Image (cartoon, rainbow, N blue to C red):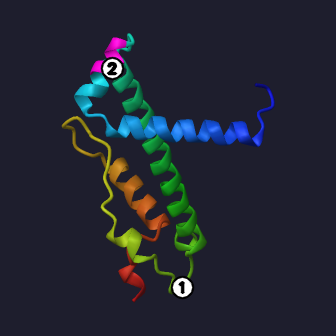
Amino acid sequence: MNNPTEKDRLAILKLEDALVDDLLAMSDNELTADSREIGMDVEQEAMHVRQLLERTAGKARMAAAKAELAEYHARGALHARGAGARPSNDLREARLTLAARNGTDQTEADIKSVAEDLAELAAFEDKSKK
């Protein structure tokens, strides 16, 4: 059936709908028993579907994060410079974290580096200019 007609397409769609309705009407036990009966490794299939969903969810979270970052850039929050420039509340209210230090204290260089990063992001107000 290389070039199905419109009639064939409609028949296939009706068949798909009927199969989905049958699957949805089955209990979990019936579905598991039928799947095993045809030789399906149910646990393997469940793991495969779980991985597929995790990848899809991960991609959705990444897309949402990229969109949020683009919106943030569009508002000019990361490009705010000069007199009176204030970052949005998003950055000031963010809970920033640092990498684990495995029980060691931060060096003066570490502290200076973090302060420079925060200053570059305009994350805190320079009180000496007031």
Where does residue 100 sit, x and y in percent of width and height?
Answer: 27, 40
Where does residue 108 sit, x and y in percent of width and height?
Answer: 32, 50
Pointer 2 local density, CA inside 10 Å: few below 14, some 14–19, many at least 20: few
Q: Is residue 90 magenta?
A: no
Q: Is residue 117 above or below residue 62?
A: below
Of residue 26 and residue 128, the one placed in the foreground of this image is: 26
Where does residue 116 sit, x and y in percent of width and height?
Answer: 44, 60
Left or right of residue 116: residue 78: right
Q: Which residue is mark 2?
A: 34
Quarter of image, res 130 = bottom left
- Residue type at mark 2: give it: Asp
Looking at the rendering, in which quadrant would you find the N terminus? Answer: top right
Can see residue 87?
Answer: yes
Q: Residue at x 27, y 46 (%)?
A: 106
Can see residue 55?
Answer: no
Look at the magenta stretch and give its main secondary structure: helix
Q: Which residue is mark 1?
A: 83
- Residue type at mark 1: give it: Ala
Of residue 71 and residue 47, the one placed in the foreground of this image is: 47
Quarter of image, res 49 = top left
Quarter of image, res 89 = bottom left
Q: Is residue 107 above or below residue 53?
A: below
